Amino acid sequence: MRIALITPYGREHRNGNWHTAARWARFLREAGHTVRTQVEWDGRSADLMLALHARRSFASIRAFAERFPTRPLIVTLTGTDLYRDIHEDRDAQQALELAHRIIVLQERGPDELATHLAAKTRVIYQSAPDIARLPSPADRFDVLVIGHLRTEKDPFRVALATAYLPEHSQIQVTHLGSALSEDMVETAEMAQAKLPRWHWLGDVPHKTVLKRLARAQLMVISSVMEGGANVICEALAADVPVLASHMPGNVGMLGEDYPGYFPVGDERQLARLLSMAESDPDFYADLLSHARQRRGLMRPEQEASRLRQAVAEFEQSAA
């Protein structure tokens, strides 16, 4: 099939949507499909459109639906659209009605949808290939935070938590990700000056992120809103347990019984879990055991198979 794959962010942004689009394009090409990845649909004929983000890709979604109303249209809800836009934005809501199939990135996603929309929804976990472990630093407990500095990520929660760690703790936190506003830059620089356990390295190449993950002992994701974070997949691929804010997108990735949750915005509870992960071997082993169980859902072969199945449902009609 000829597939138009629409992503709201191009290669230069190097964010989650772009990585998802690049990976999915590869999976579909390997299955024999022809894939054009675009930020906005150019109007060229396609047998199927696969669009990431209901609101940001709405212009392409509407244009394709108007020109080819009977051709399959798949809309993937990636984050802010799942937990904000589809509840508030008319374009995002219309995109779901136009879609023949909806994809969400974790098992709690369908909970946000009306019954008639949930019925046409499929769950496809994102994935990452195995990341070989490298020796962890001997002189510190290495904690990693990965993500751009933006409000939805609650990016300074871990920095605040470091102020409540015991004095003898060897925890050092490194945050990898660019600041998306001058205010974020100023806050990051101030936090780094006042909180000696927290270090902001800014934007770094993806291969550097993976190398740092391979040495890390823990990752924290403190978001207030997530559709299904790919950094969780990468952490589990590197055999790194996660501490996560207790919100639906993270619970859908890590499971209801995961022991590493803290309340959204609660740096004191996060500090307690950080200290436990560093000093309590049983707690750390429990985190690692649960993370390894969830890893099975997020392997590339699983993601590729589910994506190809979603597209294959429409191959006969397209033919």
Image (cartoon, rainbow, N blue to C red):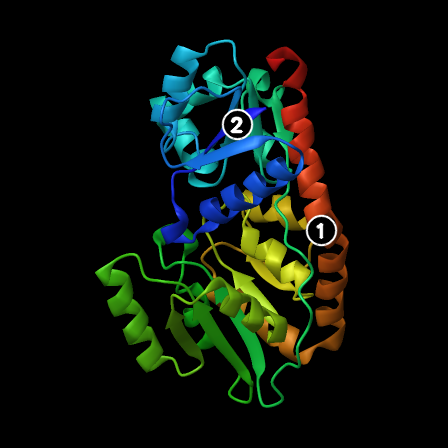
Q: Would you say residue 276 is visible in this rendering?
A: no
Give how far apart the Cα atoms at labels 2 and 1 are: 38 Å
Name above or below for residue 274 compared with residue 306.
below
* Numbered mark located on residue 3 in the image: 2
- Residue 78 visible? The answer is yes
Q: Quadrant of the C terminus?
A: top right
| Amino acid identity at mark 1 | Asp
Left or right of 319? Residue 50 is left
Q: Residues within 10 Å of mark 2 (few under 14, many from 20)?
A: many
| Residue 138 occupies quadrant | bottom right
Q: In this view of the protein, which residue sits in the foreground, 277 or 309?
A: 309
Instruction: Pinpoint residue 274: horizontal percent, then vertical percent.
Output: 58, 72
Left or right: 216 as drawn, with respect to 300? left
Kind of residue sitting beneath label 2? Ile
Q: Of the numbered discs in the image, which one, if any, rests on residue 127?
A: none
Q: Say if 148 sits above or below 139 in the image.
A: above
Give the farthest residue toward the left. 182
Question: Who is closer to the viewer here, 284 or 239?
Answer: 239
Q: Secondary structure at mark 2?
A: strand
Q: Residue at x 45, y 12 (%)?
A: 68
Which residue is at 36% across, 59% downward?
149
Q: Is residue 207 above or below residue 107?
A: below
Check disc 1 and report the residue beneath it: 257
Q: Earlier in the sequence, mark 2 or mark 1?
A: 2
On the rendered structure, is 20 left or right of 123? left
Residue 194 image position (x, y, % from top left): 33, 80
